[in-house]
């Protein structure tokens, strides 16, 4: 299984603390085997917001920062889910198939794509 963006970010943030995997786990009461699997993308990120918050705090991610949102967004994306604030925007969700077609390389008009980009920015 290829490395996951979530696992790579987790590892990068742990390394920034200048601690080994074992030191990190001992300091926070985590199982080194599970955290290793998480970092390598062999174990999916937890679904629980509480557990993700616990990990974010252990990784010293400031609540509300760009890194905070990136951490949670990558966790959801790794599980094939969209962030809840996007899901609440029905007009954005209704246009996601346009984005998916574009990502698959299908032809979409520039106007339609620009409309979607603007809608996402306002979300």
Image (cartoon, grey):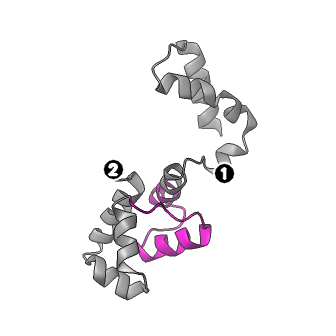
Quadrant position of residue 118 = top right
In this rendering, position of residue 13 left or right of residue 64? left
Badge 1, how many Cα within 10 Å: few under 14, some, many 20+? few
Q: Quadrant of the C terminus?
A: top right
Residue highlighted by disc 2: 2
In this rendering, position of residue 18 left or right of residue 82? left
Q: In the structure shown, which secondary structural element does the residue marked by tag 2 occupy?
A: loop
In this rendering, position of residue 57 left or right of residue 89? left
Quadrant position of residue 101 = top right
Quadrant position of residue 14 = bottom left
Residue range highlighted in magenta? 42-71
Q: Which residue: 29% across, 76% down?
A: 21
Q: Nearer the viewer, residue 19 or 67?
A: 19
Image label count: 2
Q: Nearer the viewer, residue 51 or 86?
A: 51
Pinpoint residue 72: horizontal percent, then vertical percent: 52, 58
Q: Which mark is residue 84?
A: 1
Q: Which mark is residue 41?
A: none
> Who comes first in sequence, dot 2 or dot 1?
2
């Amino acid at each position: 299984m290829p490395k996951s963006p979530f696992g790579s970010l987790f590892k990068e943030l742990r390394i920034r603390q200048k601690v080994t995997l074992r030191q990190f786990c001992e300091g926070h009461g985590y199982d080194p085997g599970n955290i290793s699997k998480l970092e390598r993308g062999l174990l999916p990120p937890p679904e629980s917001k509480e557990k993700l918050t616990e990990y974010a705090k252990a990784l010293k991610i400031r609540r509300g920062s760009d890194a905070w949102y990136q951490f949670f967004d990558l966790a959801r994306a790794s599980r094939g889910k969209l962030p809840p604030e996007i899901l609440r925007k029905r007009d954005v969700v209704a246009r996601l198939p346009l984005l998916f077609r574009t990502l698959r390389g299908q032809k979409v008009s520039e106007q339609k794509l620009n409309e979607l980009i603007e809608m996402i920015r306002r979300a």
